[in-house]
Image (tube, grey):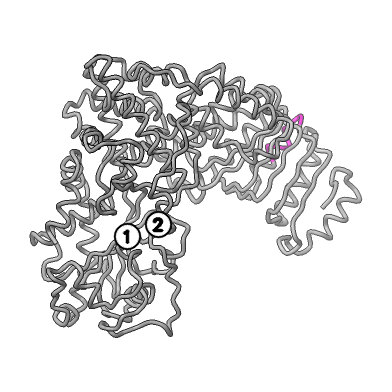
Amino acid sequence: MRRKFMLQWESHTFGKFHYKFFRDVSSDVFYILQLAYDSTSYYSANNLNVFLMGERASGKTIVINLAVLRWIKGEMWQNMISYVVHLTAHEINQMTNSSLAELIAKDWPDGQAPIADILSDPKKLLFILEDLDNIRFELNVNESALCSNSTQKVPIPVLLVSLLKRKMAPGCWFLISSRPTRGNNVKTFLKEVDCCTTLQLSNGKREIYFNSFFKDRQRASAALQLVHEDEILVGLCRVAILCWITCTVLKRQMDKGRDFQLCCQTPTDLHAHFLADALTSEAGLTANQYHLGLLKRLCLLAAGGLFLSTLNFSGEDLRCVGFTEADVSVLQAANILLPSNTHKDRYKFIHLNVQEFCTAIAFLMAVPNYLIPSGSREYKEKREQYSDFNQVFTFIFGLLNANRRKILETSFGYQLPMVDSFKWYSVGYMKHLDRDPEKLTHHMPLFYCLYENREEEFVKTIVDALMEVTVYLQSDKDMMVSLYCLDYCCHLRTLKLSVQRIFQNKEPLIRPTASQMKSLVYWREICSLFYTMESLRELHIFDNDLNGISERILSKALEHSSCKLRTLKLSYVSTASGFEDLLKALARNRSLTYLSINCTSISLNMFSLLHDILHEPTCQISHLRIHRPTRRLTPGIPTLWEAEAGRSPELDEM
């Protein structure tokens, strides 16, 4: 058991650094794990499942490894856990039928496990199930099919559900890791009494990481400042491996005496520097040609993998794109390709982002399509099923920026041949969309691409034709990116805006936290567009959840004397004041003539407010449309409406 867990972090050069870092900063997680499996603790419960959630490469596996190693050393779960059975989704996906006894014995020498002793006291038995979201079976097994016989072979879904529902080994414990997912497997087994903790690098832990990496507080502080000034880089550095790539690049730029704040502004910059520094040397033309060939084969592998949903590559895959054993050793030493920690005898990119970046280069290199052998496998695990190429296209747009592209072209002595063609195609496609705007249902993917590019004239050319834009805002990052792009939309007439999860149920008790303040500052800048954009005439706000402060910011923008909106449509909007602040603001807007309220609960108070604002002398609304199934209308409103409509021509329809 010790050897199995130690190998997983010893296999790459940054493993020891991450091992030490997570050991030092995960005390809160270890505290939860210690109390959760202590039956005398208030934190514990019968048949408890502990869920360890986190995005790709957030540190779930290393935290589990550390916990098991602490248990082996007697530093954790003393007199609580006597046996640990470790399972991964990849192992489970290879199985069809098994018994509990076989499952327990799989890691024992020659499969000789003391099954009777282990199952004699299930309360001292811990099952670790890694990557629940990656299990290929749906675990919706009927109760009647569950099994209690530990020696009976049953289908793997039946065995797992029998264990998770404690039909087998009643009283045992589970530690389950998973990525956040919309799938049913996590929801099925997450009970109200269970414990759920999420792993990500908070601001405090990120500061510890940078200080540990640079071993120089001044350098660490300068690097952190660069990251904190951009929400994209903040998001990047929530993941330990991407944090390591960022720190590695920034340190190299500092060591070379370069202005890292100027040359490391985007993920494209960071990934370009990472590849260039890792693959090139000062050995002259021969080395450049060799490393250019290495880069081309790497990009061929990356693109072939994504197109065929392959993230773990066999030796045959590597040979088919032209890699020799020496090449693989170079890439492994450069921390670009690493042994897979889930698939035996396979390699994977250090992170999916690096594979996506290499795929973006492949597009602009015009490398030929290549069918790697692993791509033809009939069965693909859930985590290998790749279909969202948004990040690839974001990197492509980043490389269309001449300064960013220069990082690679100078290092490898090679011009990416497809840049001009892709630029020409992008501009032509946007002009085509201007004639048929319904083909682009929302603009966030495009905006992320343009923010990554940040070449002012190119961005202006792309958005110049936009007269209608739809944006979905779910984070500070979304707001920052949208602000950048909307600032260039000089001919925009209609803005459709959805704000979700940013302000929902986040009313500050006393005053906003630093995080809430940052969101509110971005929101205020978004709302300022309603009176600073000269061409904007129509605003649709839909699927919005606003707290008190965010509603007041919106209201102030709508009543601003420079606001030239003529149409406002509200659909599925909830506000803290029940629309009181918002409606009062509309009464003071001198240009608004059309108001639509759709799919929103209408109370008598709101109806009364509508009546009052329509009779305000400053109110210019001449058409009011309210649409909602009558079950959401307070009794009596339809009658009042009919009576009011007879007296007020402003009440257009319902």
Left or right: where 523 falls relative to 13 = right
Q: Is residue 54 above or below residue 183?
A: above
Left or right: where 595 falls relative to 111 = right
Q: Residue at x 71, y 24 (%)?
A: 535
For disc 2, the marked residue is: 381
Nearest the eye: 351 or 517: 351
Residue 588 falls inside the magenta stretch: yes
Element type where label 1 sits in the image: helix
Quadrant in which residue 407 is drawn: top left
Residue 207 in sight from this viewpoint = no
Q: Residue at x 65, y 34 (%)?
A: 469
From the top left corner, tell me how far across and down residue 304 is, in percent: 43, 41
Q: Residue at x 73, y 64 (%)?
A: 631
Quadrant in which residue 278 is drawn: top left
Residue 381 in sight from this viewpoint = yes
Q: Is residue 387 above or below residue 275?
A: below
Instruction: Decide: few, some or many residues near mark 2? Use Cα within 10 Å; few <14, some 14-19, many ≥20.
Output: some
Element type where label 2 sits in the image: loop
- Of label 1 and label 2, which has the lower sequence position? 1
The boundaries of the magenta stretch are 584-591
Q: Residue at x 60, y 46 (%)?
A: 544
For disc 1, the marked residue is: 90
Tag on residue 398? none
Nearest the eye: 430 or 232: 430
The N terminus sits in image quarter: bottom left
Residue 99 falls inside the magenta stretch: no
From the top left corner, tell me how far across and down residue 542 is, in percent: 64, 45
Residues at circles 1 and 2 in contact by the CB criterion of under 8 Å: yes
From the top left corner, tell me how far across and down residue 282 is, in percent: 22, 16
